[in-house]
């Protein structure tokens, strides 16, 4: 079983591809964004606390986010593998995840980096905002999230690149085209049978 991350700017299709990869590998897809949105929608204590932060496109507190991830990965279905979507998102979270995995005697097998040019992700985000009306898809929120991705999230890729576990995949194309590229990477790294 495998432990993976999918990393890409908002609007890169990482949520969609993450779910598909998880199906291929028979592991749960864990999206911190989905967990946060569910809590906001359900007006839970956590949801009320983070609502304005998420709406502004800012990052939720690292400790709080780490707790959410630890709780989720402690569930039985993640014992043998998982795909994380949207976590870690900065260097502090990388260190937190490393500590957590080390405690479990585990390590990451692969980080899939979905590469999409800024104009393309902006275009997709604006379309999604119109179609789905996501609370965090306001114009300012979108800009802020792309800014945070460039400033805080891309440095995490350097750390993983040094470990030799990053597969960069071109994220421009249809869902099936992009998934085909990811599948080829999984096969070439021995994570999926050809
Ligand atoms: P996403 O669906 O991954 O784009 O996440 C939506 C929003 O949830 C982000 O803009 C953040 O406000 C929050 N969020 C998701 N993942 C994290 C994380 N790892 N750390 C902090 N905030 C996060």
Image (spheres, rainbow, N blue to C red):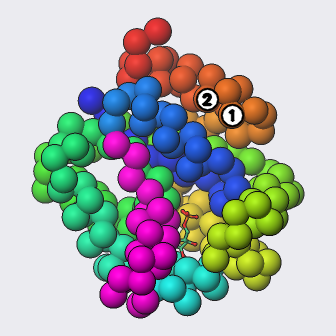
Q: Is residue 99 visible?
A: no
> What residue is at 34 percent from the left and 30 percent from the top?
26
Residue drawn at x 40%, y 12% as measured from the top left: 193
- Quick check: 58 left or right of 63? right
Q: Is residue 126 left or right of residue 191?
A: right
Q: Position of residue 14 (x, y in %)?
A: 59, 48
Q: How much space separates mark 2 and mark 1, taking CA atoms? A: 6 Å
Does residue 40 show up magenta in the picture? yes
Residue at position x 34%, y 43% in the image: 28
Check residue 112 for magenta coloring: no
* Residue density around tag 1, few if under 14, some if 14–19, many if 20 or more, within 10 Å: few
Q: Which residue is mark 1?
A: 175
Q: Main secondary structure of the magenta part?
A: helix
Q: What residue is drawn where x is 74% and y is 48%?
A: 116
Say if mark 2 contacts mark 1, CB within 8 Å. yes
Pick out the residue farthest to the front.
42
- Under circle 1, the secondary element is helix
In the image, is residue 139 above or below residue 163?
below
Q: Nearer the viewer, residue 187 or 67?
A: 67
Query: From which residue to which does the magenta span run?
Result: 28-49
Q: Report the residue marked by disc 2.
A: 179
Q: Position of residue 59 (x, y in %)?
A: 52, 78
Image x and y of residue 141, in percent? 70, 79
């Amino acid at each position: 079983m495998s432990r993976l991350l999918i990393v890409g700017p908002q609007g890169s299709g990482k949520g969609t591809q993450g779910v598909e990869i998880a199906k291929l590998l028979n592991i749960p897809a864990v999206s911190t964004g989905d967990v946060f949105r569910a809590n906001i929608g359900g007006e839970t204590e956590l949801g009320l606390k983070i609502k304005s932060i998420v709406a502004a496109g800012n990052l939720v507190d690292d400790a709080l986010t780490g707790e959410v991830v630890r709780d989720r990965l402690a569930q039985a279905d993640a014992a043998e593998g998982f795909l994380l979507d949207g976590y870690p998102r900065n260097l502090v979270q990388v260190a937190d995840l490393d500590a957590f995995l080390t405690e479990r005697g585990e390590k990451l097998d692969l980080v899939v980096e979905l590469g999409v040019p800024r104009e393309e992700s902006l275009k997709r985000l604006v379309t999604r905002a119109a179609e789905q009306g996501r609370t965090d898809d306001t114009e300012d929120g979108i800009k802020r999230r792309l800014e945070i991705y460039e400033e805080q999230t891309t440095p995490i890729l350097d750390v993983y690149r040094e470990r030799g576990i990053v597969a960069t995949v071109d994220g421009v194309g249809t869902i099936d085209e992009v998934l085909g590229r990811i599948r080829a990477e999984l096969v070439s790294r021995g994570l999926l049978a050809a």
